Image (tube, rainbow, N blue to C red):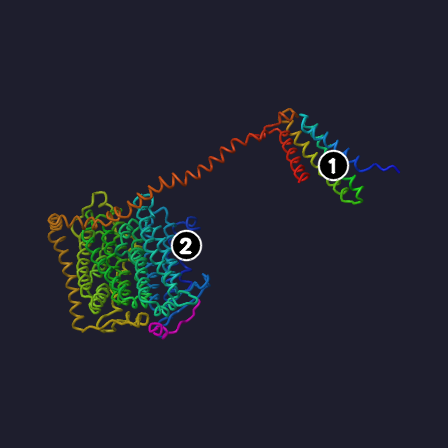
């Protein structure tokens, strides 16, 4: 295979320390789980971030070693054979190449910052140790996911992060709505995971005969001999898994509800790391996807539609976290658009910058909610920039970064995606992406203006309490703000200065299939268009929410129909409720009352009742009189004797 | 020498065994029932020894030793139970010692 040959350029170096990366969070889990309550909050708030920091340091070591090797190299460690059954032989093995190195650094780095932030955010929660147990467990699962050398090991991490997502969304489970949100996330993710599993089975069957380890290098070597139809099905089923985990149409519905969890969880799991697992998985299996062009088209189209669909919903939401949630869905759509048009590097680039600025925005919103005594409705905020100066400054950075205004990170990654869409000839998708970029700019500045500018609209009691957050929350904000500014500079377009170092670093992974190049002038025009669109979004938001504060309401009244559809999220939840949830409930109720009660229970209870009636009859034999028993023994003995004598 | 033939021993054993069995079944006093059981055991012992002698083998006599040992143990346990029961119920009548029932 071409790709295999490409990958084989670099060496695969066996190392013995990769297992430390997931081990540290595991130690954190064990400590918090068994000793956390005994040692108290102080110890937990020291240990939980420290183990993630240790994982980050090991990841940095691995990254440095990888940089010292020739391009296309990988570090590998096999721990032990995990599954040996028939022609399946899976090792528990970890691998760090350019792609997983970036992912491990993002996950452990951003994860560390959010652990530090959580120490401040969750300080008054009585289930502090449990929270960090879950958070460390998430790090363990997520690092397993990105370090995995084979599809089955990746799936372990994939399921693990899903479990932690469920546990953390429903962390405040005493509220019925939170528990329901966790359950929804879990169930919707199962739908996607079914697709993932089917794809894995199909892949296993389709690979050439022999023993399969399902490692990525083995799959890369084998995909060439699979017929295109099967390959397309494998790619599409894997994408079903990705739509579940990464909240794409039609399985995105769990992510907005997932905001029921603590805000640092939203930042870590539902913005920066877990939801990007689908993008990572497709980038990881890029050699498979390039051989299934029609599946790629589906990925790109679904991504673009999701990007604009979620952005339009985000325009009118009033809950600060809901806006960010729909924004996340929309930005994930961009990433899928990128990998769908073959720009895997651009997709991972946006994944990274998005982890910075969306992590920042979520943490910032958490700081706002913290300062507003738990209020999440932006209509009751306003004027916070004087009360929370550092939250405000970092939030501005995050907003400008996501809006795609240069020279912040979001501009470079979003621009490389849009340029790739255009270069690959998907003009419609490019247009959709540009419009979504304008909408993104609008709803983010709307959020900024409604929250931090104007008059404060909260009630007396809350206003009295507004305060800036403690340093443990502000320091991660500042670090992420710096990253949101400089994070994009490692992937400069047009060979400016040091050029696209990020893309060059990843190139050996995605090597075999580079995109067609465009004229420099076209590229510059595209950039000007996307910046102009972002500025238009900013301008409209500025006009509607600062210059003429009443105009938003007027517009909403004037276009009441459209407004209501957007506010009610296109009634997607209602449609799912009517088409899937209610019929399933009705069927379940029918099965319960007819089959379960009438047949299964009746059989079981009938058997038990029969035995009981029989016993009631025969227990009379137990008279308690020893001589009755003696008589029966005598009769028994005589019967036996008679039988043997007369036989 | 006038040797008593094996049949007589077997008949005596059977008669003793029957007396014991009837005693167990018809008497109400548990101590008498106990003695009847001893009688049944010794009837069997007699038959064992008789056949052992008749067939010139040692196994029958070995079995008798086992039976006597077990009988001794059984008498100890049984009498202890009877005493315990008597302390609770002030009776050794089998008809009244029937509280282990449905």
Place of residue A130 in the rendered image (x, y in percent of width and height, measured from the top left): 38, 49
Place of residue A605 in the rendered image (x, y in percent of width and height, measured from the top left): 44, 37
Q: Quadrant of residue B88?
A: top right
Q: Is residue A525 left or right of residue A299?
A: left
Q: Do labels 2 and 1 share a chain?
A: no
Q: In which quarter of the image is the C terminus of chain A?
A: top right
Place of residue A21 in the rendered image (x, y in percent of width and height, measured from the top left): 40, 62
Q: Which of marks 2 and 1 is in front?
A: 1
Sort mark 1 into few (<14), some (14-19) or many (20+) by Cα contacts within 10 Å: some
Q: In this view, does B10 lie to the left or right of A24?
A: right
SS under mark 2: helix
Q: In which quarter of the image is the N terminus of chain A?
A: bottom left
Residue A113, labelled with which disc? Answer: none
Single out the residue that lies furthest toward the front: A646
Any part of residue A50 in sight = no
Subunit that carries the residue with mark 2: A
CA distance for labels 2 and 1 = 72 Å
Q: Above or below — where is A499 with respect to A370?
A: below
| Residue, disc 1 | B44
| Residue, disc 2 | A29
Q: In which quarter of the image is residue A222?
A: bottom left
Place of residue A592 in the rendered image (x, y in percent of width and height, measured from the top left): 36, 41
Sort mark 2 into few (<14), some (14-19) or many (20+) by Cα contacts within 10 Å: many
Instruction: Provide the residue span drawn in magenta.
Output: A1-16
Any part of residue A445 in sight = yes
Q: Nearer the viewer, residue A222 or A128?
A: A222
Q: Is residue A341 left or right of residue A25?
A: left
Is residue A4 inside the magenta stretch?
Answer: yes
């Amino acid at each position: 295979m071409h790709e295999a040959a490409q990958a084989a350029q670099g060496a695969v170096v066996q190392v013995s320390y990769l297992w430390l990366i997931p081990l540290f969070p595991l130690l954190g889990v064990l400590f918090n789980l068994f000793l956390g309550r005994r040692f108290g909050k102080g110890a937990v708030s020291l240990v939980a971030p420290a183990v993630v920091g240790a994982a980050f340091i090991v990841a940095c070591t691995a990254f440095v070693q990888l940089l010292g090797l020739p391009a296309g190299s990988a570090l590998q460690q096999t721990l032990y054979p995990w599954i040996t059954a028939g022609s399946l032989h899976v090792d528990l093995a970890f691998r760090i190449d350019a792609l997983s190195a970036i992912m491990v650094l993002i996950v452990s780095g951003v994860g560390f910052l959010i652990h530090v932030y959580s120490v401040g955010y969750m300080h008054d929660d009585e289930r502090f140790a449990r929270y960090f147990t879950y958070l460390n467990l998430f790090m363990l699962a997520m690092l397993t996911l990105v370090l995995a050398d084979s599809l089955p090991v990746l799936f372990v991490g994939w399921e693990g992060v899903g479990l932690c997502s469920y546990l953390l969304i429903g962390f405040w489970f005493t509220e019925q709505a939170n528990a329901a949100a966790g359950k929804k996330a879990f169930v919707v993710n199962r739908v996607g995971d079914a697709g993932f599993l089917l794809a894995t089975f199909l892949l296993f069957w389709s690979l050439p005969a022999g023993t399969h380890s399902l490692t990525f290098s083995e799959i890369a070597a084998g995909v060439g001999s699979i017929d295109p139809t099967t390959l397309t099905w494998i790619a599409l089923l894997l994408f079903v898994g990705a739509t579940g985990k990464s909240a794409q149409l039609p399985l995105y519905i769990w992510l907005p509800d997932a905001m029921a969890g603590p805000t640092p969880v939203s930042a870590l799991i539902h913005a920066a790391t877990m939801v990007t697992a689908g993008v990572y998985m497709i980038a990881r299996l890029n050699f498979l996807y390039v051989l299934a062009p029609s599946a790629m088209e589906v990925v790109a189209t679904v991504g673009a539609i999701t990007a604009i669909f979620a952005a339009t919903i985000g325009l009118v939401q009033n809950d600060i976290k809901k806006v960010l949630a729909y924004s996340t869905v929309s930005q994930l759509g961009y990433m899928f658009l990128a990998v769908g048009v073959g720009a895997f590097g651009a997709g991972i680039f946006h994944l990274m910058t998005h982890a910075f600025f969306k992590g920042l925005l979520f943490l910032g919103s958490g700081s706002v909610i913290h300062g507003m005594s738990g209020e999440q409705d932006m209509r009751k905020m306003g004027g916070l920039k004087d009360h929370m100066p550092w939250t405000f400054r970092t939030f501005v950075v995050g907003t400008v970064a996501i809006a795609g205004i240069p020279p912040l990170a979001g501009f470079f990654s979003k621009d490389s995606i849009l340029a790739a869409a255009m270069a690959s000839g998907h003009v419609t998708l490019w247009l959709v992406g540009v419009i979504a970029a304008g909408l993104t700019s609008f709803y983010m500045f709307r959020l900024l203006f409604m929250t931090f500018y104007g008059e404060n609209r909260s009630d007396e009691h809350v206003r009295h309490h507004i305060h800036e957050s403690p340093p443990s929350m502000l320091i991660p904000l500042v670090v992420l703000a710096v990253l949101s500014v400089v994070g994009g500079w490692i992937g400069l377009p047009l060979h400016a200065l040091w050029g696209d170092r990020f893309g060059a670093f990843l190139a050996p992974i995605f090597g075999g299939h580079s995109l067609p190049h465009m004229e420099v002038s076209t590229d510059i025009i595209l950039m000007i268009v996307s910046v102009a669109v972002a500025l238009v979004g900013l301008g409209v938001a500025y006009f509607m929410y600062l210059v003429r504060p009443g105009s938003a309401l007027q517009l909403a009244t004037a276009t009441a129909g459209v407004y209501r559809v957007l506010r009610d999220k296109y009634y997607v939840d209602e449609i799912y409720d009517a088409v899937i949830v209610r019929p399933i409930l009705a069927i379940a109720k029918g099965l319960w009352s007819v089959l379960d009660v009438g047949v299964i229970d009746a059989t079981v209870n009938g058997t038990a009742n029969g035995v009981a009636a029989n016993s009631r009859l025969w227990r009379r034999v137990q008279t308690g009189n020893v001589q009755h028993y003696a008589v029966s023994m005598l009769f028994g003995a005589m019967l036996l004797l008679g039988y043997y004598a007369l036989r | 020498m006038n040797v008593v033939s094996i049949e007589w021993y077997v008949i005596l054993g059977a008669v003793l065994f029957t007396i014991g069995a009837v005693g167990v079944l018809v008497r109400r006093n548990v101590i008498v029932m106990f003695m009847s059981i001893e009688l049944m055991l010794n009837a069997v012992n007699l038959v064992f020894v008789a056949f052992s002698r008749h067939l010139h083998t040692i196994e029958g006599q070995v079995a008798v030793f086992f039976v006597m040992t077990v009988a001794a143990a059984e008498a100890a346990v049984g009498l202890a139970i009877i005493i315990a029961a008597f302390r609770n119920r002030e009776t050794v009548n089998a008809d009244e010692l029937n509280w282990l029932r449905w």
